[in-house]
Image (cartoon, helix red, strand yellow):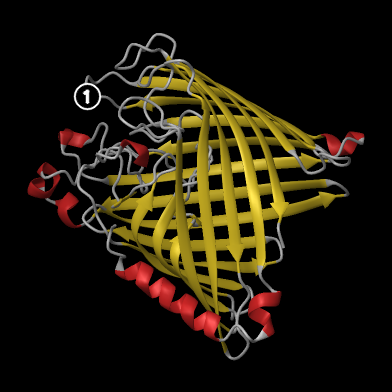
Amino acid sequence: MKKPSSLTCLVLGILSSAVGQAARADFISDSKATLGLRNFYFNNDYRDRPGPAGQSKTEEWAQGFMLNYSSGFTAGTLGFGVDALGLMGVTLDSGGGNHRGSSMIPDDGTGATDQWSRLGLTGKVRLGKTEARLGTLQPKLPILVSNDGRLLPQTFQGGQVTSNDIDNLTLTAGRLDQATGRASTDRTGLAVNGGTRQSNDFVFAGADYKVTKNLLAQYYVANLEDYYTQQFFGLQHVLALGAGQSFKTDLRYFDTGASGANGSASGRAEGHRVGGYTRHGSGEIDNRTWSAMFTYTLGGHALTGGYQSVSDDSNFVQLNQGTLPDKGAAGSSVYLFTDRMLASFTRVGERTWFGQYAYDFAALGVPGLRASMVYLKGDGIQTVAGAEKQEWERDLALDYVIQSGAFKNVGIGWRHAALRSQIDPDQDQTRLIVSYTLALF
């Protein structure tokens, strides 16, 4: 058996402290537990790009179980509590030889594994409106977004503090040292796409300030040791235009530069480098990305248009463990409007226009039914050969949550995407997800 990490010991210590005070009713009475069920069919056709074993697509079907327990806090000025996350995936069908890599199901060396699982514990402490959490985390922040695009979610290990003690202001800070991929049971260190050396120190801090009822300003800064320092500036505004009408503006800007080993030739030679095209082939991180999205809503209709520009020195980066030796570590998200099913449109020099239409059928008396379609076109991608490349993606989505009867709250989702790229393989992808969350107590 592996020796427990110091972080695990600390979490268990917090748990013991909390349980020792559990006679205080708040810890027990405010506890909640749910069991999430997710049945996931995944088909990705690479068309003319066969994989190492000759297969040209991934086709898999699996069942996921997500047990989520959250305690209340012990009474008193300083409240203690604990959360637990149990995840298990079961392979139903690996497609008769169509298991390609570890996009959704871990690879056991001979093909898709039969089942996999992991457990995460999180100790928490609350003082006023400030909460500190230590253990397993799933951040949803501008500088880091935990990926939940497959059967089981990506998780991170570390600590995070969130404070709402000042009216209209949310302050966030934390440090992470490990990640577990969505198709893995193993923790790895942290990296960027293209990096082969692990870092165990990602620190971040940020503020969300509600300037007015309809205006939100954001600033975040993050540093991944030996890779990069990133600053984020965001502005969101909603303009009410009348009954059932609104116009939302969302502006985002990232400034990312080399830090530590990535800033030196010797450090990059050791593996602290970013993938893709970089100026002079250096592998050094140097990027500025800005994007704007505008959404007009009228009743059940939502029409969106936007633009994104990536500077021409290196790709946009956020945490991405996909090039580390553990293949199950792949799969990441970025806080950009262009992060879609198949591509993220974050390559050097890429300029992307996108448009989306969504409709909520509740406006027609069919609550729970939603549909959307989006098209993105990126060009100006810089390459070593000198010629600029381009790509486009089209995504369709249909979701329905059953509103009554024996299957009330069962969600059914269908996704289909097509990517045509001069950089990546052409792909057609289909996902079918059936989900249900059962409240245990």
> Could you say which is closer to the camera, residue 330 or residue 113?
113
Say above or below: 328 vs 56.
Answer: below
Quadrant in the picture for the C terminus:
bottom right
- Front in this rendered view, residue 78 or 369: 78
Q: Residue at x 32, y 45 (%)?
A: 287
Q: Residue at x 67, y 65 (%)?
A: 32
- Residue at x 77%, y 47% (from the top left corner): 246
- Asked whether residue 337 is in view, the answer is yes
How many numbered discs?
1
Q: Is any part of residue 152 visible from this angle?
A: no
- Residue 126: image quadrant is bottom right
Q: Measured along the vertical axis of the image, is residue 183 above or below residue 163?
A: above
| Residue at x-position 78% and y-position 44% | 409
315 or 362: which is nearer to us? 362
Secondary element under disc 1, as helix, strand or loop, is loop
The residue indicated by pointer 1 is 384
- Which residue lies most toward the bottom here? 77
User: Where does the image place residue 113, in percent across and percent down from the top left?
Assistant: 41, 32
Q: Residue furthest front?
A: 1
